[in-house]
Amino acid sequence: MQIKLVHTADIHLKREDPFRLNILSWIISKTKELADGLIIAGDLFENNTEASFLRGSVREIFEKIQNLPIFIVPGNHDYGSYSPDTFYGENVVVFNSPAFHIIPGGMRIIGIPFKPGSDFSTLIEKIKINPDTDIVITHGTLYDRESSRIYTELGEDAKYMPVYKWDIENKMRYLALGHYHSRFIHLTYGKTQVVYPGSPVATSKRATGMRYLALGHFKRSEPVRIERIPVEISPYWKKIEWMVFPGKEEKVVKKIEKDIQKARGTKTMLDGHIKGSIAISEIDFREKIREIEQKYQNEFKLLELQIEVSYWTDILKNPTIASFIEKLEKVNRDDSVKQRALELTLSALEKLRA
């Protein structure tokens, strides 16, 4: 018997962004269409206060599809939102302490909730896990060389609920994680599949690219199969950087417009950054960029172009400098490296002239 489960996390529901409730409703409908149940791996709510205000709306969304089991573990933002006196619906299982729930197919779902000051290693010891059958849900930070981007990007938030390789490798079939928002991550540790689906909502500009759900196909004696399911209604950030060199301003302006034309979409929030150095009037350059921004802003969910350029005056009229810039532009190195080389060179020359 095969069981299919949708896995999401980090919706961070809050009143000031009611569209997130629409996304939750879409997830419930998509789960009913594709799977047998839904896993929410923490931080359904932005905080406990938001949970108090939105609980009724969430319960209504959860109950609109009958007989759809929903499994929730609290996260670091909403761990106080699920007391025994709260009710989220007859079809909802909340793991307020390490526990298991038997599902069809001879498998178990084990919930390890976030607890302040606790670590996954200690909490998981309270339950004997079967590596051939058990699906584990938790909300925390995976620490491993393969996942260094996760804890590096989380920064201060990486301290919450550390999960280590030796806690999970070959010790469970699937680890459903929450806490990392930016993108979908799927890792394999022996027979254990580990997934961060990323937030289905673009919670910040770091959450770039299409938002996804994870769809797991579970069948005893067969490897777990994972699919990415696009959250089609969710807007998402796309980041583009452009580097401009003195004398190449018009070329870059044309490229910016061309790239914006390619990126446009009603769900796209474009975070554009224009860096480098210019030799033309700053006012004229900014005006050209603002004209592009105004021309295309209605073709995006949001369009933001940040101008972060340096303006160099008569020093750029020096033919030696002009030759240097032309040669530098042809160097096969990252634009940010070339820009830094240009800035250091121009700064040094400016000091020599002083």
Image (cartoon, grey):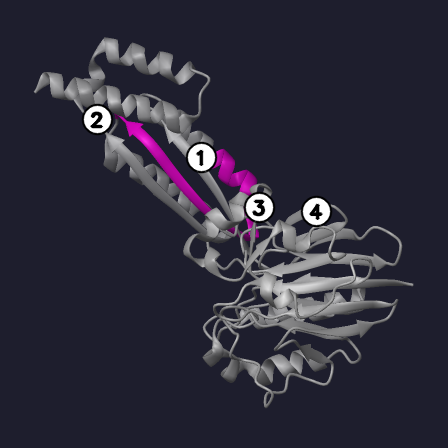
Position of residue 150 measured from the top left corner of the image (x, y, whole percent): 53, 49
- State which quarter of the image contains the C terminus: top left
Q: Secondary structure at mark 3?
A: loop
Q: Secondary structure at mark 1?
A: helix
Q: Nearer the viewer, mark 1 or mark 4?
A: 4
User: Which amino acid, by three-letter code, is at mark 2?
Assistant: Trp
Marks 1/4: CA distance?
A: 42 Å
Indicate whether residue 158 is drawn in magenta. no
Position of residue 277 measured from the top left corner of the image (x, y, whole percent): 29, 28
Residue position marked by numbered label 3 in the rendering = 144
Between discs 2 and 3, the one toward the N terminus: 3
Q: Nearer the viewer, mark 4 or mark 2?
A: 4
User: Which amino acid, by three-letter code, is at mark 3?
Assistant: Asp
User: Which amino acid, by three-letter code, is at mark 1?
Assistant: Ile
User: Which amino acid, by three-letter code, is at mark 4?
Assistant: Tyr
Q: Nearer the viewer, mark 3 or mark 1?
A: 3
Image-quadrant location for residue 67? bottom right
| Residues packed near mark 4 inside 10 Å, few (<14), some (14 to 19) or many (20 plus) | some
Secondary structure predominantly adopted by residues drawn in magenta: strand
Q: Which residues are magenta?
A: 257-279
Residue position marked by numbered label 2 in the rendering = 312
